[in-house]
Amino acid sequence: MRSKPNWLWIFPLVFIAVLFYWPLSKIIGLGLSANWIEIYLESSTLKAIWFTVWQAAVSTLIALVIGIPGAYILYRKKFFGHRFIRALITVPLVLPTIVVAIVFSGFSDIPAIPLILLAHVFVNYSLVVRTLGGVWATMDNETEEAAADAGAGRLRTLLQITLPQLKPAIVSSAALTFLFCSSSYGIILILGGGMVSSIETEIAVASLQFLDLNKAAALALLQTAITVLAFTFSESLAKHPIGIEQVDESGDKPAVDKRDWPAAAITALVVIALVSIPLLTVLFKAFSVDGALSLENFWNLTGRGERDLLNISVWQATLNTLRNVFISATIAVTLGALISYLLSRSLRSRRARFSNRFFDLLFLIPIGISSVVLGFGYLVTFGDGPLPLRSSWLVLPIV
């Protein structure tokens, strides 16, 4: 097989080195130069760290508990409308977290912390279901059938045979879910109402409100460490690529029967109560004013908000967003295709396999770095000098 030219690595490596690892190294340098031990031992920091870790862990656990039945019903069984439900539960995953926070802020009767947990599960439920379901759909069921013939019950088969086979996918989805929940900013900022804080919100407060760059850098360093540890844990324990699996729909799947009713009931409850109701709430609010159906909200998009508080109209902002999305997608697809091409080379030697795993992790880490941490890195790196990106609109599509 003809080897792929190594010089092609120059383009993606220069891009990620300059626009990601350079700002990240500035954060690390600032964080290590600060009195980070004292910063970490501050009561406000300890509370933020504890809240970040436990709420991410609880959100991940809930998403896994309700996601496993969902993956089974939606990917292991066949029924009318299963593809529509798959698409429906994917919508929260692609919604901006600010939009999610605004939607859940309408449920004012629920306390802040349970509301934050619900919002995080709302966003990450599809991630767990699709990751587990993609693997589950391709698993051979001969072992399960043999266990059933031997007299093993459904629960015992699930715990002793099915879940061990799903362990790589479970670990991968849990790692990503924990990352997204621990690096959540908009949801905690809006739904927390200033009563709770996470590492992300503390970074924003320290850098933007108090201009304490050393504290912000120390906290950003901690958040980065959490990201790297989560990816390392997933890679070493799971030996399974992080991502959403592609499903082969060519095979026949059995229909839902009476034994599947508990899993089907849990999935139906989640789809209706956790996914559909918040999405319908968005739809209702968009087409109503003071409880009455109206298109006034859409007409207001041509203005600059109440009392002209916005610098530009919403339509102008939409055009800017589409421009940024187009540029970002072009860069991402081009570099992603090039990286995939280079990583698809032959892995006959141990050195080649190690090199591929290294580069895979190198380009995977940016997924887990939050926009707050990366934005802070750009703030301290590209304010002036050879690349004053902070003052250019190009910084948005590049990030």
Image (cartoon, rainbow, N blue to C red):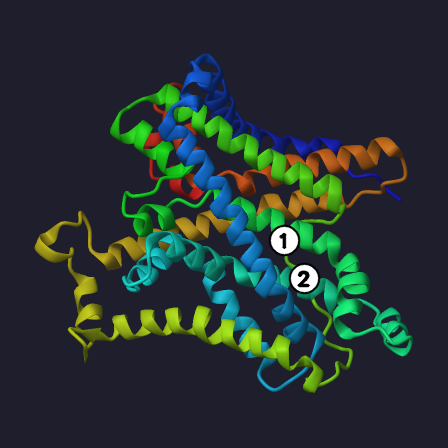
Residue drawn at 76 percent across, 77 percent down = 250
Count of marks, rendered view: 2
The residue at the point 60 percent across, 62 percent down is: 65
In the rendered structure, which amino acid carries the disc numbered 2? Leu
Which one is nearer the viewer's eye here, 40 or 327?
A: 40
* Image quarter (top left, top right, bottom left or bottom right) of the C terminus: top left
Q: CA distance from mark 2 to mark 1?
A: 8 Å
Mark yes or no: residue 333 visible.
Answer: no
> From the viewer's perspective, is residue 176 above or below residue 15?
below
Classify 96 as above or below 66. above
Would you name the residue on which mark 2 appears?
132
Query: x and y percent of residue 16 in the render?
Result: 56, 33
Q: Position of residue 108 (x, y in %)?
A: 27, 61
How many residues crowd around disc 1 within 10 Å: few (fewer than 14), some, or many (20 or more)? many
The residue indicated by pointer 1 is 173
Q: Residue at x 56, y 74 (%)?
A: 266
Which residue in the rendered view is the most extreme toward the left?
307
Q: Amino acid at mark 1?
A: Ser
Query: What is the quadrant of the N terminus in the image?
Result: top right
Residue 94 percent coordinates (x, y)? 47, 59
Query: Toward the viewer: 81 or 165?
Result: 165
| Mark 2 and mark 1 residues within 8 Å of each other at the beta carbon | yes
The image quadrant of residue 355 is top right
Give the structural element (helix, strand or loop) at label 1: helix
Crowd class of label 2 (few under 14; some 14 to 19; many from 20; radius 10 Å): many
Give whichever of discs 2 and 1 has the lower sequence position: 2
Could you tell me which secondary element the residue under label 2 belongs to?
helix
Q: In which quadrant of the rendered view does residue 335 lie?
A: top right
The image position of residue 177, as x and y in percent, is 56, 51
